[in-house]
Image (tube, helix red, strand yellow):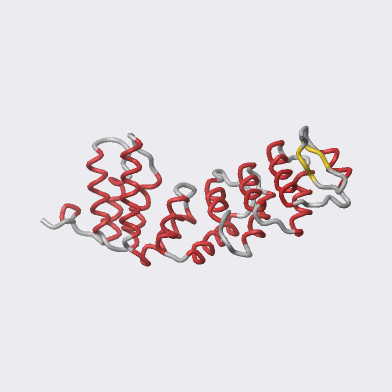
């Protein structure tokens, strides 16, 4: 009996669908799930790659088994090389979960410049509007934080207006490493916005202090908005109180 004879006839896509159901089974005998992953690793085609990627969407107990299986799936997908890129990109664009795994896979197959482009394109697609789960935005911004590309600053600036505080803070971490005069007004507006939370205000102030942004024209408004522990010096620069 051949490796896939137990699945009967059908196209590779149909075989992949049958195996995917077993590969994403959280409960029961883990050997069933692990065997399905091995069979998917032998099955060629984008459907098999997509089915393997679905394993990243579930978590099983114990955690050591979960991590081992995911690392194995990572190796199986990475071994497919360029043919895995399209399914991984599609998964990244279509799923909130496992974004960090997808970027890690792309980084193992593509050049850094190509992965940066993927991240920037997806951030532009997601935008700063409401999302039920901000995980992808957080992962993408964290990935870009230490990368070198002149477009990253503007991409991150957009997310100062995001609906989620965690995303705003992630954007501020990116911007803190890329001080530029063009950020002065957006940072001030973020600080003064009536709906800005205290922790985001603190993040804005850290970024402003680090970048030594002068508050010309906004001194009185910023002074009135400063939380405890912050001050403006004579030059109009934000500083933490000693």
Could you tell me which quadrant the N terminus lies in? Answer: bottom left
Could you tell me which quadrant the C terminus lies in? Answer: top right
Place of residue 14 in the rendered image (x, y in percent of width and height, measured from the top left): 28, 57
Q: How many numbered discs? A: 0
Q: From the viewer's perspective, is residue 165 above or below residue 54? A: above
The residue lying toward the viewer, choosing from 224 and 240, is 240
Place of residue 105 in the rendered image (x, y in percent of width and height, measured from the top left): 41, 57
Using residue 50 as the reference point, say whether residue 146 is left or right of it: right
Place of residue 28 in the rendered image (x, y in percent of width and height, measured from the top left): 26, 35
Question: Which quadrant of the structure image shows residue 9?
Answer: bottom left
Residue drawn at (88%, 45%) of the image: 234
Q: From the viewer's perspective, is residue 87 above or below residue 232? A: below
The residue lying toward the viewer, choosing from 62 and 41, is 62
Using residue 211 as the reference point, say whether residue 166 is left or right of it: left
Using residue 78 as the reference point, say whether residue 128 is left or right of it: right
Using residue 58 as the reference point, say whether residue 193 is left or right of it: right
Residue drawn at (35%, 53%) of the image: 74
Place of residue 95 in the rendered image (x, y in percent of width and height, measured from the top left): 47, 51
Q: From the viewer's perspective, is residue 27 above or below residue 130? A: above
* Residue with the most extreme front position: 242
Question: Which quadrant of the structure image shows residue 33?
Answer: top left
Residue drawn at (35%, 43%) of the image: 67
Residue drawn at (68%, 50%) of the image: 160
* Residue with the most extreme left position: 1
């Amino acid at each position: 009996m051949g490796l896939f004879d137990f699945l009967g006839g059908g196209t590779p896509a149909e075989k992949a669908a049958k195996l995917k159901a077993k590969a994403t089974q959280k409960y029961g005998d883990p050997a069933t799930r692990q065997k399905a992953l091995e069979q998917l690793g032998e099955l060629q085609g984008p459907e098999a790659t997509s089915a393997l990627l679905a394993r990243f969407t579930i978590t099983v107990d114990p955690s050591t088994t979960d991590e081992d299986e995911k690392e194995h799936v990572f190796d199986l997908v990475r071994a497919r090389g360029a043919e895995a890129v399209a399914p991984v990109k599609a998964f990244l664009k279509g799923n909130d979960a496992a974004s960090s795994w997808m970027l890690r896979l792309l980084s193992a197959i593509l050049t850094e410049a190509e992965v940066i482009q993927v991240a920037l394109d997806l951030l532009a697609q997601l935008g700063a509007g409401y999302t039920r789960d901000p995980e992808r935005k957080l992962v993408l911004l964290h990935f870009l934080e230490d990368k070198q590309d002149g477009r990253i600053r503007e991409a991150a600036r957009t997310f100062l207006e995001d609906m989620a505080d965690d995303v705003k803070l992630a954007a501020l971490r990116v911007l803190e490493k890329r001080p530029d005069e063009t950020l002065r007004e957006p940072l001030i507006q973020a600080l003064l916005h009536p709906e800005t939370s205290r922790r985001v205000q603190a993040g804005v102030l850290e970024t402003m202090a680090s970048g030594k942004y002068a508050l010309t024209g906004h001194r009185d408004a910023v002074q009135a908005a400063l939380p405890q522990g912050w001050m403006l010096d004579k030059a109009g620069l934000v500083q933490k109180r000693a």
